[in-house]
Image: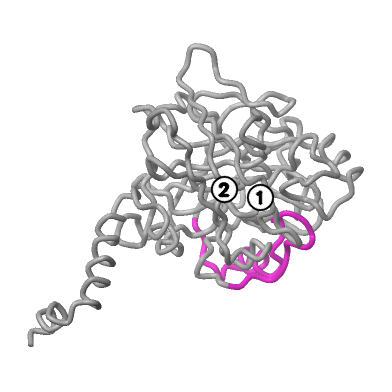
Amino acid sequence: MVAAPLGAGSRRRWPPLGALGAAAACCRGASAAALAAKESRAETRIINGTVVKNASEKYSFFALPTSGPDSNSWLGCGASIISPTFGLTSAHCFGGGLRPCEGPRSLALWLGEVELRPDRSIVPVPGARSFRVVADVMCSSDFDGKCSHGHDIALLKLRLEHGGLPAWVKPVPVDTGAGGGVALLGSSVKTIGFGLMESEDDPASIGDMSASLREVAVDVLPQDAPQCARVFSGGWGCSDQYSEGAAINLDQQLCAGAADFSRPRDTCAGDSGSPMIDATGHQVGIVSYGGGPGEVMSGPGRQCGDPSYPGVYARVSAFAGFLQDHVLDLPGAAARVDAVSFAAAAAEDPPLQRLLRGS
C-alpha cells in the first residue's frame, strides 16, 4: 500500500469526494480547482503491498469510515475497532491545519468484506460478511491541527442500538504499554488500508486507489535515523500546508518504512487512521503523516514510497490514559477503573486511609 497523495498537500488523508469548496475534512488550504486537478491524477492504495484475502477473518476489526451517518461515500481514511463499543482513528481525518477536527461529527463504519468503487462509494461484497454501524467522533482535545505535533488520535463511539457487534468482529487489542506489545524498534509491523498504490506502469510513481483492503510490512526505524529526522523536520503529509511543521512530542510518534531501500514499502493517501499491528497482534500505531515536501507524485521525494521520506504513526501506547479514561470496555480498563474508584473512596474515608497506611 504505498500510498499516493490523497489531497492537496496531503499524503495520508484523501479529500472527500464532492466536498470541493465545502466543509471538507482535510486539504482546506487548497483551492477547489487544485483539489479537482489532484483528484484527476491520483486515487488511493498501500505501496508494494498485497490484497488481503478473507478480510473479515484476518482483520475483522478494520473499519472503513464514511463521510456521514447517512452516506456510503468513503471519508478517505481507515479506522479500527478496539472494543465492543469504540473505534479508533486519526484526529486529522476530521480536519487539520486551521480547522482541526471540524467534522463530520458522526459517520458510519463499514466492517468485513467491502469494496471501494471508483466513485469512492463503499459497497459490501455480495454473499460475504459485512456490517455497518453509525459512530460519533471524539477527537483528542490536545490536537492542534498539526499531525507532527502529536495528539493525532480520535475515538469513534459506536451507536449499537439494536444489539452489539457481530460475533465475527474481534476488536484488536491495543498496546497500552503494559507488556501487551513487543519491543518495536527494528521490528517488522503490518499496516493495512485502502490508500493509494504505486503505479503499475512505474513503481516510482503514485497510482490509483485500491478497491480492496491491502497490507504491507514496514520496519520501525530509529527516530534519529537520517530519513526519520528529515520527515520530522518538516512534518509533511498531514492535511494541508497549515497542518505542517517541525515535529514535537516525539514520544507520541513512530517512524516506519523500508529499512531496505531496494524495495520501497509505505502507507499513503487514504491510509490515515488505519492501524499498525505488531507481531503479537496488538495495535501499536495509527497512520498519521509522512513523505516528502510539496506535491511530488513520482521519483525522489514523492509523497509516498520513497524510503528517504518514511511514514510517521501515532504511538498508541502514548495514549493509554486517554483510551482507558474513555473506553471503559477496553481490555484491562476495568481494573484501572476499579483502582481509581477505590482511591477516590479512600480519600473520603479516614479509617480506610489509616488502614492503608498500616496505622
Q: Is residue 252 visible?
A: yes
Q: Is residue 59 visible?
A: no
**Residue type (three-letter) at the residue carrying disc 2:** Val
Q: Image quarter for residue 301?
A: bottom right
What kind of colouring is applied to the model shown? Answer: one colour
Q: Name the residue under label 2.
A: 137
Q: Is residue 124 magenta?
A: no
From what the image shows, is residue 111 above or below residue 138? above
Q: Position of residue 195 (x, y in %)?
A: 64, 39
Q: What span is colored magenta in the figure?
A: 220-248
Q: Do the residues labelled 2 and 1 touch (CB within 8 Å)?
A: yes
Quadrant occupied by the C terminus: bottom left
Is residue 204 toward the left or the right of residue 168 in the image? right
Indicate which disc, 2 or 1, sits on the residue closer to the N terminus: 1
Q: What residue appears at the point 31 percent right and 61 percent down from the top-left corner?
A: 178
Which is more toward the observer, 169 or 257?
Answer: 169
**Residue located farthest toward the top when viewing the structure as drawn:** 127
Q: Position of residue 36 (x, y in %)?
A: 87, 39
Q: Position of residue 335 (x, y in %)?
A: 24, 58
Q: What residue appears at the point 57 percent right and 36 percent down from the top-left corner?
A: 49
Q: Name the residue under label 1.
A: 94
Q: Where is residue 69 in the image (x, y as percent from the top left)?
A: 61, 34
Which is more toward the observer, 357 or 291?
Answer: 357
Q: Residues within 10 Å of mark 1 (few under 14, many from 20)?
A: many
**Residue type (three-letter) at the residue carrying disc 1:** Phe
